[in-house]
Image (cartoon, grey):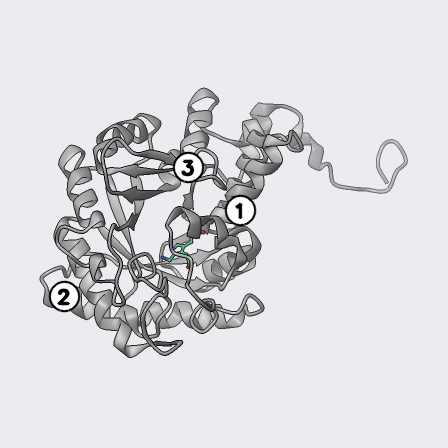
Amino acid sequence: MTANGYPPFRRFRRFRQTEGLRKLARETVINPEDFVYPMFITSGTGVRREVPSMPGVFQVSIDQLPAEMSELRSLGITSVLLFGIPDEKDELGSSGYREDGIIQQAVRTIKGVDDEITVITDVCNCEYTSHGHCGVLHGEEILNDESLELLVKSAVSHAAAGADVVAPSDMMDGRVAVIRQGLDQAGFANTPILSYAAKYASAFYGPFRDAAESVPEFGDRRSHQMDPANRREAFREIEADIDEGADGIIVKPAMTYLDVVSGARERFDVPIAAYNVSGEYAMIKAAAQNGWIDEQRVILETMLSMKRAGANLIITYHAKEVAAWLQGQERQVGAVVG
Ligand code: PBG
């Protein structure tokens, strides 16, 4: 019995009384270095085209990249993930691996202005094929093994342009093994592979497909991306990718798959990225624009949830605004969220 006659109980509130105490007890902290900022690169000059379903996200032309890099640097963000929107698309997505392709030019430009920005490139065919599918087609079937060579060509051409990391997002089986072999043979043994290992066939990619102009002409991506109903299968995918040579893995989407992030963290010791995808971004922006939620607090809480689940890296379109808030506030976001 305690002094006031009540049975004994724990006083969790002791550490919640002041911000100073809360800071001492805080388990998860967000820093701008945790973020990877995704960018959509398009041809032309002077282009800054806002994606309608993603307010604050722009398709930008290559000449905009130096200014973009200095903005990111001033915010403390040091890594980007690049998606290309090519002028020409064909059946085999050949503009994806041309030396003067949109991504290859963008990588060279970024590396030319700021060598210390870590440039990660998305490796997939869907932005480059006329049919919008991730591989070679036979009728309406997406062929697995026949698509691998194209992915290798893209990955090698990105590395040759100076990419620091390649991130295959296609979900063909065996692609990590084949890309690793291709990179090694081309002299890029030191280029890491960050594989989208657990990538689900998700409706949350909707706005991205507008942004990257990669809506499939027919059908969907369920023959290669994972079934949203499956969790254990994700760990087999991740294990296989690590065995094949992945240096880090991505779980995607993030918010509706935090159980997968958390389970992956318990099982695997590689760096884990959570991809906070376009639909997740769009939902928050839409609710905020309607005045239905406290935008800043909701976004910061979302960022915390991904790190708390076990992600080291957060790939997010919110990166710039969050980094700015962190600068304006303290670098511990709990101060803002709490
Ligand atoms: C494929 C790719 C996609 C995304 C990243 N890489 C789209 C898809 O699989 O259809 C989605 C990212 C997002 O929704 O933010 N190149």
In front of the other: 77 or 67: 67
Residue 75 is at least partly visible in this image: yes
* Residue at 33% across, 44% down: 40
The crowding category of the residue bearing disc 1, from other C-alpha atoms within 10 Å (few below 14, some 14 to 19, many at least 20), is: many
Q: Is residue 163 left or right of residue 317?
A: left
Disc 2 on helix, strand or loop? helix
Q: Note whether ligand 1 is within 8 Å of mark 1.
A: yes
Residue under pointer 1:
280
In front of the other: 26 or 328: 328
User: Residue 31 has which mark?
Assistant: none
* Residue at 44% across, 62% down: 199
Query: Residue 298 sits in which quadrant?
Result: top right
* Residue at 28% across, 72% down: 147
Residue 163 is at least partly visible in this image: no
Amino acid at the residue labelled 1: Glu
Q: Residue 4: x, y in percent?
A: 88, 31
Camera-near label (1 vs 3) is 3
Q: Note whether ligand 1 is within 8 Å of mark 2.
A: no
Q: Residue 121: x, y in percent?
A: 27, 51
Residue under pointer 2:
184
Q: Residue furthest top?
A: 328
Camera-near label (1 vs 2) is 1
Of mark 1 and mark 2, the one earlier in the sequence is: 2
In front of the other: 27 or 290: 290
Of mark 3 and mark 2, the one earlier in the sequence is: 3
Q: Residue 170: x, y in percent?
A: 35, 64
Ligand 1 is in which quadrant of the figure? Answer: bottom left
Q: Residue 219: x, y in percent?
A: 47, 69
Q: Note whether ligand 1 is within 8 Å of mark 3.
A: no
Residue under pointer 3:
57
Give the spatial CA distance, label 3 vs label 2. 35 Å
